[in-house]
Amino acid sequence: MLHPEEGSLPSGDRAALRRIDLDAPVTPTLWKVLFALDQDDAPDWISENKWERRWAALLMGMAHCAGLHDYDVPLGQALAEAGWSETRFVRLLEADDETLMVLLRRVAQYLASKQQPANWDDMRGLLFYQSGDTAEDIRLSIARSYYRTLHAQDED
């Protein structure tokens, strides 16, 4: 949907997603995408406000990296390959809801500036599962791919 050449979303709407204000994310473009993805209603385990804000954050990041989503490049690997510092990486994995929203924009802008493909489903996991066993599994998976990639770079 967000891919510059193959996606169905016009460039003006992708630009609107990149500019989303995460404190007031409700924009016509956000609603277009949520309805198209059948994600306009929050599940019982999350408030409507948090649901919309997290989707806005995810779509904002993906809009910055339009054309760079790749299921075969785990987020941790992508960050390591792009040169994202270990200090920033740790902050990302430890971030709470509000901080994660801010860091997501930085991650997206950084990956876009490096033209680094990444699996944005990993970021979705960070956003939507912030506590419990699932959240821990997601964070560990991202960390494994980050440190595996750093280790491989060190051996080269």
Image (cartoon, helix red, strand yellow):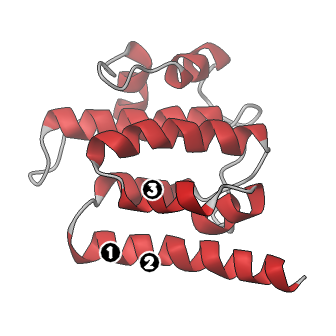
Q: Name the residue under label 2.
A: 140
> What separation in Å lies between label 1 and label 2 (alpha carbons)?
6 Å
Q: What's under tag 1, amino acid-wise?
A: Glu
> What separation in Å lies between label 2 and label 3 (alpha carbons)?
14 Å
Residue closest to the far bottom: 155
Asked if residue 37 shows in the view, the reply is no
**x 60%, y 63%: residue:** 86
Q: Please, what secondary structure does the residue beneath circle 2 have?
A: helix
Location of the C terminus by quadrant is bottom right
Q: Dividing the picture into quarters, in which one does residue 6 lie?
A: top right
Q: Mark 1 points at which residue?
A: 136
Q: Position of residue 27 (x, y in %)?
A: 37, 15
Q: What's under tag 2, amino acid-wise?
A: Leu
Residue closest to the far front: 87
| Rendered view: 13 above or below 108 | above
**x 59%, y 26%: residue:** 9
Q: What's under tag 3, amino acid-wise?
A: Arg
Q: Mark 3 points at which residue?
A: 91
Q: Are marks 1 and 2 in contact (CB under 8 Å)?
A: yes
